[in-house]
Image: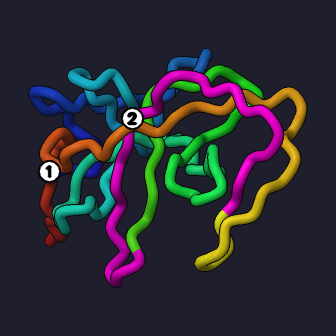
Amino acid sequence: MGGAYESGSRLKAQALVGSDGSRTPMPAMHDTQLDVDCTYALAADGVQRCLPVDAAPISGYAEGTCTMALVSSACPLFGYTSALGAQCPRRRSVYAIGSPVVLTGAFYVKNGTSCSGIAVPAGVTFYAVGGEMAPQSFVAGTVEVEP
């Protein structure tokens, strides 16, 4: 093992290249199959996997029972969202971001077991959250300690 990241068959190392020719490794790998940057985290199945970075967090719900999860953004979104499980160690589940959703009236937020409606913020687009992606969709890894 060396100090630099190494590309594999699916995950590719990334570097930031300065205008002076300098190079520094980026902390994220690029998953060529999913076309996303990823870093290793504990996935829903308890295995370290390279999960998408910059995943938009679930921000609320489309209805008063708080079951149809949404993500929101002032900029167009694509890709993935994720959520941490409640058990320790906390495992991350990844979901695909779906189509835009038009909300009329209220946007709902969950606080413990209650679900409350708030005014829909201006200038924000909401997106449906798809089903959970199988953890096996992401590259697994193991931690190695250098001597």
Q: Which mark is residue 96?
A: 2
Mark 1 → mark 2, Cα distance in angstroms:
19 Å
Disc 1 or disc 2, which is closer to the eye? 2
> Percent x, y for residue 140?
14, 50
| Residue type, label 1 | Ala
Q: Which residues are magenta?
A: 86-109
> Percent x, y for residue 100?
59, 23
Q: How is the image coloured?
A: rainbow
Quarter occupied by residue 96: top left
Which residue appears at 45% of the width and 58% of the height? 83
Crowding around mark 2 (Cα neighbors within 10 Å: few <14, some 14 to 19, many 20+) is some
For the image, the number of numbered tags is: 2
Crowding around mark 1 (Cα neighbors within 10 Å: few <14, some 14 to 19, many 20+) is some
> Quick one: SS at disc 2?
strand
Which residue appears at 39% of the width and 70% of the height? 85
Does residue 10 lie above or below 80 as drawn? above
> Percent x, y for residue 39?
36, 47
Does residue 104 lie above or below 109 as drawn? above
Q: Which residue is mark 1?
A: 140
Q: Which mark is residue 117?
A: none
Quarter occupied by residue 28: top left
> Quick one: SS at disc 1?
loop
Residue sitting nearer the eye, 107 or 37: 107
Q: Earlier in the sequence, mark 1 or mark 2?
A: 2
Can residue 26 be seen in the rendering of this structure?
A: no
Q: Going by the image, does 53 lie left or right of 62?
A: left
Q: Going by the image, does 7 lie left or right of 108?
A: left
Which residue appears at 65% of the width and 66% of the height? 110
